[in-house]
Amino acid sequence: MSEELQTIIDLIRYGGSRFNAAGLTFGHSYDNALDEATQLTLFALHMPHDLSPVYGQARVTAEERKAVLALFQRRIDERMPAAYLTGEAWFAGLSFKTDSRALVPRSPIAELIEAGFHPWIEGLDVHRALDLCTGSGCIGIAMAHHQPEWQVDCADISDDALALARENAERLHVDRRVRMLKSDLFAGLSGEVYDLIVSNPPYVTHAEVDALPSEYRFEPELGLRAGDDGLDIALRILRDAPRHLSEGGVLIVEVGESERALEALLPELALAWIEFRVGQMGVFAVDRETLLAHAERIAELANARG
């Protein structure tokens, strides 16, 4: 039967059908079966990820077809995210090395980076920026790539994640302007002050982590789990960020589906929820002065988490 799959588009269509029939879960860079089948097909054929559709009718050799189908089978049998099978994920227009040392890059913050954080840092002269909970380094490295005048620090508690982030900084030739720092949130950043702090911290609830599909077991749980409401880490960031923000500095944090829980906890805190091309996605911006005005209540909530 496989001999009937003669072209690139044949393989992509077939892969999409197989993935849907197998009940795979998508959400690591791509959100549907056809896009993942495209990613795996082009990787197996050693073709660029953005290959023009005009090549869709190009015929494949028997060996190429065998390689593509083998990768499809691994995706089905192992339930491993496609990005881990290929070792690559695209974020903010850049190719990042990706493996199980850190979450697969997929934050909507990529859109902000490519837009220069407009309009959220209008009038703010950014010299130093921090990517807190950096994981693979994708946010901080992409900031350094798109804003060559910025000095960027990437902080994480995981040695494995920092090792991967260093590899990505070298891969994308920004290692001279990006520092990798081991830190449990701000604990290891004493005296460091930034004009912009960006964070995609863990924000998945205990119940949600326990119910995640098989694909997510390959990712480090440390990068996902954040308490009963998903806010254990975000509240600590809100509490401690003012000490590390310059006057007028801005904090941008992704909390995903925990957005509603955060608004319920701190209805008086004026967070600006950012609209993306596909709508609101649980990312807020807030300035240092606003955080200071509500510091007592934020600290009360954060300290209660231990």
Image (spheres, helix red, strand yellow):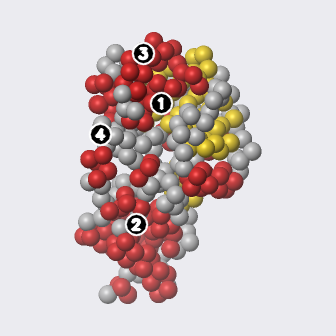
Give the percent coordinates (x, y) of residue 177. 72, 41
Looking at the image, residue 199 sits to the left or right of residue 304; the answer is: right
Q: CA distance from mark 3 to mark 4?
A: 22 Å
Q: CA distance from mark 1 to mark 4?
A: 17 Å
Mark seen at residue 119: none
Residue at the image position 31 percent from the left and 19 percent from the top: 267
Q: Secondary structure at mark 3?
A: helix
Residue at the image position 57 percent from the left and 59 percent from the top: 97
Q: What's the amino acid at mark 4?
A: Asp
Look at the picture and state if 29 lies above or below 187. Answer: below
Q: What's the amino acid at mark 1?
A: Ile
The residue that disc 4 covers is 228
The disc, 2 or 3, on the residue closer to the chain's N-terminal end is: 2
Name the image quarter holding residue 256.
top left
Q: What's the amino acid at mark 3?
A: Glu
Q: Nearer the viewer, residue 289 or 65?
A: 289
Please, which residue is most extreme toward the front here?
306
Q: What's the amino acid at mark 2?
A: Met
The residue that disc 2 covers is 80
Q: CA distance from mark 2 to mark 4?
A: 27 Å
- How dense is the environment of label 2, judged by Cα within 10 Å: few (below 14), some, or many (20 and up)? some
Name the image quarter holding residue 194.
top right
Mark seen at residue 296: 3
Give the percent coordinates (x, y) of residue 37. 39, 67
Give the percent coordinates (x, y) of residue 43. 51, 69
The disc, 1 or 3, on the residue closer to the chain's N-terminal end is: 1
The residue that disc 1 covers is 237
Q: Nearer the viewer, mark 1 or mark 3?
A: 3
